[in-house]
Image: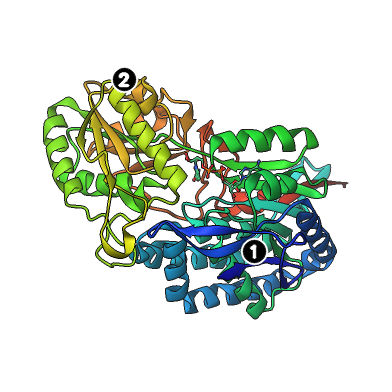
Amino acid sequence: MDKILNYINGILTEPIEGKFFHTINPAIGKPYALVSDSDKADVANAVAAASVAFPKWSATPARDRSAILIKIAELIERDLDKLALAESIDQGKPVALAKALDIPRAAANIRFYATAILHESSEAHFTNQEAINYTQHTPVGVVGCISPWNLPLYLFTWKIAPAIAAGCTVVAKPSEITPMTAYLFSKLCIEAGLPAGVLNIVHGVGAKAGQAIIEHAEIKAISFTGGTATGKIIAATAGPMFKKLSLELGGKNPNIIFTDCDFEKAVATSIQSSFSNQGEICLCGSRIFVERPLYEKFVTEFTTRTKALIVGDPLDEKTNLGAIASEAHLTKILSYIELARQEGGTIIQGGNQVKLIGRCAEGYFLEPTIITGLSHTCRTNQEEIFGPVVTIMPFDTEEEVLKYANSTTYGLAATIWTENLTRAHRVAAKVNSGIVWVNCWLFRDLRTPFGGMKQSGIGREGGFEALKFFTDEKNVCIKL
Ligand code: TXE
């Protein structure tokens, strides 16, 4: 079996204790590779390598940092098919999705920050005729980047690209559930000539390797994407150590559909926002609110199209929904479907595990599921399920739907469907989410601030926000 090795100080290396665990291909339910089971000592080595590399890397001119990053982006593009296949095998997502979304976006993340640093400027403040203040941005030092399993290489690169571009050196940990593409990425970094120690990738489980990263005194900032419960642990550990924190956590996103919407676009896009990547995207719209005059028509059409979705082998280009990322996650989603039943919901479509025949007979597949008849306050409508499960609820007034939309502890993303521009602005202003899409979903411009309100996180990624996060600001005041 292939071994997924750590990448420390420019070298692919086994963990010090020599321990490994299996990573599972969720489409066939079987182990297919061994993952380094790293611990504190491996993290300490990675931090030491990053600390040694920091002075030189942070002093490397932006154009040289940029050139190496561009080279890495080119190598990702060269290996598009190989990386997409690896992502699909490791995560369960349709290979077509990995080819169209995950891997191109990983290259785009790196290109974006490679070029952003060529266009940086800093602020100056003139205090009457008496003084000039200017702001310096300096890289914070060694930083930790911890990423999840739903969009593995996409979210891994979304964190490490701004960190490295800003001049920081990095200790990163991909999810133990989906470590493969980060491992392949480390080989591309070596090929591109990234200096030793600039990026160190430590594989292992969250409670051990991840925890060691957040606890390490020399790590100055943590950028994390994952579950809200883990985010709380990270904040509780890193907060008292005064580390900078960027936390991108869960969501329970409302998808608000008004009668005056473009019906065809609203239905077609809602299918995507509900079930893309098996619903395992923090931005998926899991609570669909439909204005009452349109409710029956929407439910009928949405259900018909959901029925037509193909749950199948991720390697088949026709597949719409692949495997759920892990058996534990499948069990969690099924328990929420059961909870919805207990709470009085009606499963109008799906609700069951899918048993495929042939190669994928033991895989973790689930029907796309639609639930109606629930109140906005029940647990099914309050807690993040993170799977191909949506609820649909009717509403009568804007005021009412805003109350429903804002009723959870989350505030990541919201979608609004209306052809009435005034209403779009009005509702967008009142919905408590860090991201609002009007008449679209997951339409991304990497320059925009990305992140959530309430328990969906703190801080913003994207654009210059992320570069700022990885730098310290210093004001220099010169008296004239
Ligand atoms: O994520 P975890 P899990 C949500 C989703 C899902 C739930 C739990 O609802 O069902 O979170 O998923 C690392 N110190 N999202 O448990 O544990 C871990 O190794 C440091 C939303 O799989 O948060 C992995 O690299 N690191 C989401 C990363 O944290 C720790 C994406 C994420 O894993 C750690 C994924 C610790 N103590 C799940 N414990 C989104 N917002 O996109 C774990 N990790």
The three-letter code of the residue at mark 1 reads: Ile
The three-letter code of the residue at mark 2 reads: Glu
Residue occupying the point 53% across, 59% down:
23
Q: Among all residues in the image, which is located at the extreme right?
A: 479
Q: Which residue is mark 1?
A: 117
Q: Earlier in the sequence, mark 2 or mark 1?
A: 1
Q: Position of residue 116 (x, y in %)?
A: 59, 63
Q: Position of residue 90 (x, y in %)?
A: 47, 61
Q: How is the image coloured?
A: rainbow
**211 shown above or below 287:** below
Q: Which residue is mark 2?
A: 399
Q: Is residue 121 visible?
A: no
Nearer to the camera, 11 or 439: 11
Ligand 1 shown in quarter: top right
Check disc 1 and report its element: helix, strand or loop.
Answer: helix
Image quarter in which the N terminus is found: bottom right
Q: Position of residue 92 (x, y in %)?
A: 40, 58
**312 shown above or below 67:** above
Q: Is residue 478 visible?
A: yes
State the image quarter where residue 55 is shown.
bottom right
State the image quarter where residue 4 is shown.
bottom right
Nearer to the camera, 480 or 249: 249
Q: Position of residue 360 (x, y in %)?
A: 33, 60
User: Is disc 1 surrounded by few (<14), some (14 to 19) or many (20+) residues within 10 Å?
Assistant: many
Left or right: residue 274 versus residue 467 is left
Residue occupying the point 82% across, 45% down:
217
Check disc 2 and report its element: helix, strand or loop.
Answer: helix
State the separation of the CA atoms marked 2 and 1: 44 Å
Nearer to the camera, 189 or 165: 189
